[in-house]
Amino acid sequence: MARTIVVTGAESGIGAACAEAFGAAGDRVCVIYHADAEAAQRSVAAVQARGGEAMSVQADVGDEYGVDAAFTAVERTWGAADVLINSAGLNMSGVSVRTMALEQWQRLITTDLTGAFLTSRRFLKGRGEAPADASIIHISSIHAYAVRAGGADYCAAKGGLTNLVETMAIEEAPRGIRVNAIEPGMILTPMNARAQSDPAYRQSLEQNIPMGRAGDPSEVADLAVFLASDHARYITGARIVIDGGLSLMQALGA
């Protein structure tokens, strides 16, 4: 039976790959995008080409009213969502704390952490109180725990997301709603545009990955499909790393 899937940040990168993967599973997918309507339509077309139904809705995940309107549009068309994939996010600024503007800090926290809270809350409200099989999957990062200089904004947001995921997992388990996080390492998405366009730069990064290569968005999407499936029905509150072993290399040079 087809499920209703909401994917934020679904116009590109991991979000677009997740939308397509759920389309291949025969699901109905709502592509939530921030600004690029043409890219969102490409994601819609990719879902449909794989056999799923699709619609697109514009929303800023950091805006409470925009999130509510997006979920209302989904519910009017297909009913309450069964799965939320929260992939919308901004990358780290590369600016140190001592020079970071408050606006930069707030911008990233609003999208990467508050956005996860708002979309999760609206998803849960839409489902009501009755127990049912449902799933929330947040696309986090290995930088939730493996911090980098210049990444205080991003690392703080993803660290906070860890605690949000674990708290919701406890709260929603009695209702049958599972909440998990996927923590990717280096994935070839628009966030890593330089690695996609500059082979030498990409190789300099990949040499730090035990598996010797960056990941593909489809590999993260496959994991999301698994976590939303019956095969993962006893998994909640988990943080699943998908990074080719990169985060195991933290102590190099110690």
Image: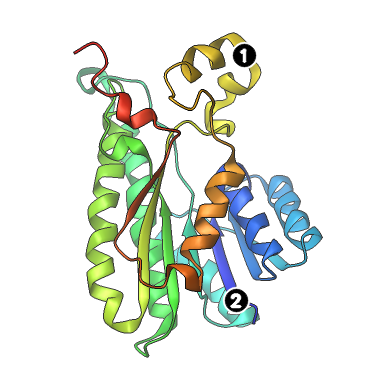
Q: Residue at x 20, y 19 (%)?
A: 98
What residue do we see at 62% from left, 49% from top? 17
Above or below for 91 versus 80: above
Query: Where the N terminus falls, by quadrant?
Result: bottom right
**Residue position marked by numbered label 1 in the rendering:** 198
Give the position of the C terminus as an image quadrant.
Answer: top left
Q: Nearer the viewer, residue 32 or 215?
A: 215
Q: Determine which residue is flagged by label 2.
A: 3
Q: Point out residue 46 in the picture as x, y percentages from the top left corner.
A: 75, 54
Q: Amino acid at mark 1?
A: Asp
Quarter where residue 158 is shown: top left
**Colour scheme of the rendered structure:** rainbow
Expressed as whole percent of the image width and height from the top left, the position of residue 174 reads: 27, 82
Q: Residue furthest bottom?
A: 130
Disc 2 to disc 1: CB gap under 8 Å:
no
Residue 58 point in image, percent of width and height: 60, 57
Question: Residue drawn at (44%, 80%), measured in percent from left and top?
Answer: 133
Earlier sequence position, callout 2 versus callout 1: 2
Asked if residue 187 shows in the view, the reply is yes
**Mark 2 → mark 1, Cα distance in angstroms:** 39 Å
